[in-house]
Image (cartoon, grey):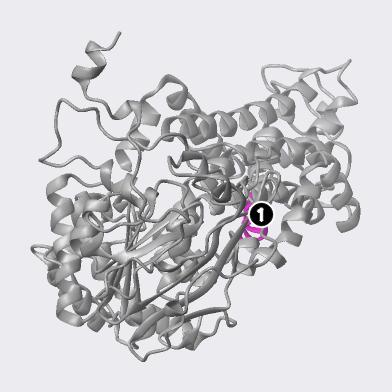
Amino acid sequence: MQGRWRRVVRTPLGLTATVLVVAVVALAVLGPVLWGSGAGAVDTDAILARPSARHWAGTDNLGRDILLRVLVASRLSILLALLATVIAVVAGSLLGSAPFVLGRRTGRWVSAGVNIAVAFPGLLLALFFAVVFGVGATGAVLAIGLAGAPAFARLTQTLVAGVAARDYVAAARAVGIGRFRILLRHVLPNIAEPLVVNATIGAGTALLSFAGLSFLGLGVQSPSYDWGRLLYDGIGMIYVNAPAALAPGAAVLLAGLAFNLFGESVAKGLGVPVGGGLRGVGSARAGAASGPERTDQGEEAGDRSPEVVLDVRDLEVTVSGPSGPVRPVRGVSFDVRRGEAIGIVGESGSGKSMTALAVTRLLADHGRVDASRLEFLGDDLLAPDTAVRRRTLGTTLAMVFQDPMTAFNPTRRIGAQLAEVATRHQGRSRKEAMARAVDRLTAVRIPDADRRARQYPHEFSGGMRQRAMIGMGLMGAPALIVADEPTTALDVTVQQQVLDLLAAIREADDVALILISHDVTVVGEVCDRILVMYAGRIVEDLPAAELATAARHPYTRALVDAVPDMNTDPTEPLATIPGRPVDPADVPPGCAYADRCPLADARCEAEDPLLAADPAAPADSPRHRVACWQAGEPLPVRPDDRSIDDLVESP
């Protein structure tokens, strides 16, 4: 961080702006001390004197030196501007964070109020608040501070929305940490830098606004004076003594320019978005609507055995889209038993990750989750949130996210983030929680765990971050681990290490596992059962051992064929799935895979098949289910399936 700031100062613009800011601040601190007595000295023999060697900017109607008064007024002018900026930042941060803390429904009203306030010019709001709070320095500070708050609220709302989408925030929610605590520990530290930079720019704007209110007679009142008040006094004699007005005007200009240039140079050097002061930026919002339509799963998914860890029936996820509600998950039903490993595969957009986020209750603000039953260890996940349920989920449910780069809060040490689970849900002291964190890091095969626990996430490699994320889930006694493509961002060697670790944890502690992946080979090696998803639905549920040999759905067989292996003929073109996945906002009638399926007929295009037990499945595979009218039919040979030699020889 220090190196980044040094790079900013080394640029010509940054160096100039820094020198100006330091000079302005030094003037504000030393001005009244050095020239306070001289600025207040009345000289009746030099009333309204013109500029001279003794009085460089002349004197006022009491013979006081105007230049000295400008130098002394720097403290009050800058102090009041900074106070107004602090009010704007604090009020704006509170308003901008409210939607995150209050939730989507209540926060929507706060966002609407902020959007209305941003539509008004900042100076107009300042004049309105100045009338409300009354004439004087206090009223002007409140007026300018509250007038700048909507812009900071919009900026904060956007920054919070960006950070709230990170995996480490989702992980904190998964372990049951409350919204307010997440805001303080995970969100605000990661948006502090852009807020500070924009506050610096906002200070320059506040300084100009404050001078304007004082010039209009709504700010500082006699006998106190700031640059705006001196400008008001000097404008009356501008034709007789122009420096009387130019001196305070130049002070306002230089000080405002110093703050703005400094903020802009820092923003450019650090890559921080600029949107503070009286400027606004866009906001991020999400909504949801509509409920479930139907159930298409068999009775097997409703098994209420005590061995069932997760029971999902008729799961629907609805999010808002540009043209209305979109359902990326449509009537999904399955269960996970203790110690069982379930793999969920499918192309991008098939609804795999949305299903995982829905069952872990991490879509509360971004979509609507409906189900006829959604239970984890017998606890209804659709019931209102309580501290008891958060504690239960925090210690018995673990989530491993796709990208290890965003799995942890970059501003906090690894050990402290793991220890938070123990202090929050297990009542451990800070020392005990840290010892537990070190033990869990050791358990996930991180060498020198005691030293590593005191390091920041950027000091870990990708594989180590992913293992540490698994270690966070092991801080309690998880009954289920949901791993959302945990090996995507890792190289092949580290991928195998992570998969071996998950398998070892599952075997040692009888932990259930949901593994989401694009790679059917990976889930086939690690999991017991495979759920194949397409267009938000499960189209086949089969034992992993039957994936390569007994898959019945054409889509499942196409996924398996698309993965080359050591026996793949290099002279043959690689198998592909024709067409593109279905847009969740425009799912066609009938079977969603019909447009890409070589077996599709008129019935497939008109009727959507239900997921039901496959009558042709092996007798020892009673849980094999498929949603297809042409299940098990041989696939025709397409022209693209010809060998390269055939293609070369063909005319």
Q: Amino acid at mark 1?
A: Gly
Q: Where residue 621 sits in the image (x, y, percent)?
A: 28, 73
For label 1, the residue is 92
**Residue 105 percent location from the top left of the image:** 70, 66
Q: Looking at the image, is 430 positioned above or below residue 119?
A: below
Query: What secondary structure characterizes most of the magenta part?
Result: helix
Residue 515 at what x, y percent from top left? 30, 62
Q: Quadrant of the C terminus?
A: top left
Does residue 94 show up magenta in the picture? Answer: yes
Whether the magenta-drawn stretch holds residue 358 is answered as no
Query: Seen in the image, is 311 located left or right of residue 556?
Result: right
Quarter of the rendering occupied by the N terminus: top left
Picture quadrant where residue 473 is located: bottom left
Which range is magenta? 85-97
Q: Nearer the viewer, residue 176 or 310?
A: 310
Percent coordinates x, y for residue 2 in the rendering: 32, 41
**Vertically, is 629 above or below 620?**
above
